[in-house]
Amino acid sequence: MPQTSVAALQVENIHKTFSGLEVLRGISLEANSGDVLSIIGSSGSGKSTLLRCINLLEKPDQGRIIVAGEELKLKPARQGGLEPVDRRQLERLRTGLGMVFQSFNLWAHRTVLENLIEAPIHVQGKSRREAIEKAEALLAKVGLSDKRDVYPAFLSGGQQQRAAIARALCMDPAVMLFDEPTSALDPELVGEVLKVIRDLAEEGRTMLLVTHEMAFARDVSSHVVFLDKGDIAEQGPPQQIFDAPLTERARAFTSGFSR
Amino acid sequence: MRFDWIAKYWPLLIDGAIQTISLLVISVCVGFVLAIGLAFAQVSGGLLSRNLSRAYCTFLRGTPLLIQLWLLYYGVGSLLPLVPGLRQSFLWPILREGFFFAAVSFTLNFAAYQAVILRGALLSVPKGELEAGRAVGMSPFTLVRRIWLPRAIRIALPTIAGEVVLQLKSTPLAFTVTVMDLYAVAYKVRQDTLLVYEPLLVVTLFYVALTAVIARSFKFVEAQVPIRR
Ligand SMILES: Nc1ncnc2c1ncn2[C@@H]1O[C@H](COP(=O)(O)OP(=O)(O)O)[C@@H](O)[C@H]1O
Ligand SMILES: [Mg+2]
């Protein structure tokens, strides 16, 4: 298969309305393999909703989602919005979209290792041995080998988020979706999580990164999307968005973060 | 105080303890399984199943267990012989016994209380943890089996422990439908020996010991998943 010519993730014309409030007004994005696509914008501009529509944690009203060339088949739902035609297809495509949440969302009744091997065993059907081997390698990579058998409640926020990233990586996702991964962290813990994300970017992971860490976004992104009130107000290479934005809206937003 | 009767009655006491424990274990285990269905019917079922489950819980929690037991024993019990072929079936020796009616009645009652507790626990599992399960591609059934239900049971465990002890203390009602449980044995000893306190004291010790065992077991299970307070 000509994998290289197919976009890792393609999103077309996503619309989403919450009880009359139009949160997304036709968003289209494309991430090629190895792209780091940062999504910035003020609070309430629809960044989380966009990520959640991509893996259908939220039902979009309109739009197309194509993961590694495979389109997610959608049909109108009775309660409004779109729903998957085939639940199995959605579940399969979701395993290719590694989601990292602002609030970590580790399973509290499972140790760190158990969090990591849960989906490989019970969703992908891998053997326990294989899953553990992979999980241990990823724990070493995010620097949590010594926390293997600890429950999430006994970890710092930074450690929990690194574990959550490792949990997503266990599925070998084609694309990682980060929703403000450092926003819930104490300032002194932000660095350790950003370091893990930077390593992933450098080894060529495809990712969508919603963030308020402007210096970081500028550093690691191949492409920056500025979202404003549910629209893409401007997009382009980081130098353009941060140093010479073409639109007034982007200028107003990024100048608020000037170093 | 006289305890010499124990020498003669201890086999009966043991039998009584076995009856009591059986009633407890059957009603708690089967009732718990029913409660899982009832709770999910309320949390994620359609309008009809939600209302049916609610009505069931309200009715069984809102009426005295003794009356439920008697309705079953004298009501349903008197209808059973009319079912064609049932008297000849191999099940009849069981269906004829008071024990069967006590077990069914305690089970249905326990299920109602347990369902309400589980419902609350299911709703208190953080939404984000369920979303994390969906996001890694779990099917609805896998999500329930691996995340939602086990997580809810952990949350409800201390409350469940209390309910099981309460259930133990309801078992003497079985005496009213001819079951020879611990309490019934104490009653018989009192009748036979005309001793007022001693038999009651002895069975009280049994109940206390059982309660201690229940509490210990739940503590042990809870300790398997440490929670930071
Ligand atoms: N489940 C929901 N129900 C109703 N409104 C919502 C819901 N989720 C988000 N919104 C609204 O949609 C808008 C965009 O939210 P969100 O995507 O979370 O923004 P961001 O992540 O950029 O801060 C906000 O006005 C928010 O209040
Ligand atoms: Mg957000």
Image (cartoon, rainbow, N blue to C red):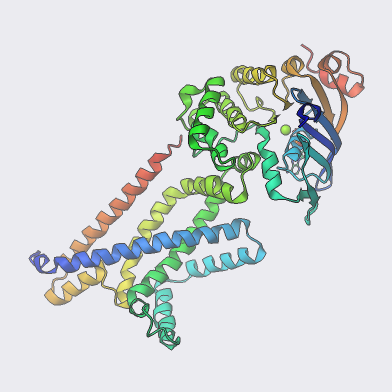
Name the image quarter holding residue A212: top right
Q: Quadrant of the C terminus of chain A?
A: top right
Image location of residue A139, percent across then percent down:
53, 24
Looking at the image, which is closer to me, A91 or A2? A2
Residue at (53% x, 35% y) in the render:
A117
Q: Quadrant of the N terminus of chain A?
A: top right
Looking at the image, which is closer to me, B130 or A115? A115
Residue at (40% x, 75% y) in the render:
B69
Examine the rendered structure and indicate whether residue A84 appears above or below residue B116. Answer: above
Residue A232 visible in the shown view: yes
Residue at (78% x, 54% y) in the render:
A77
Determine the residue located farthest toward the top in the rendered image: A259
Residue B200 visible in the shown view: no
* Residue A68 appears left or right of B75: right
Looking at the image, which is closer to me, B83 or A187? B83
Image location of residue A245, percent across then percent down:
88, 17
Image location of residue A21, percent across then percent down:
83, 43
Examine the rendered structure and indicate whether residue A40 appears above or below residue B57. Answer: above
Residue at (66% x, 26% y) in the render:
A183
Image location of residue A28, percent across then percent down:
85, 34
Examine the rendered structure and indicate whether residue B191 appears above or below residue A201. Answer: below
Name the image quarter holding residue B110: bottom left
Q: How many marks?
A: 0
Examine the rendered structure and indicate whether residue A69 appears above or below residue B206. Answer: above
* Residue B53 appears left or right of B25: right
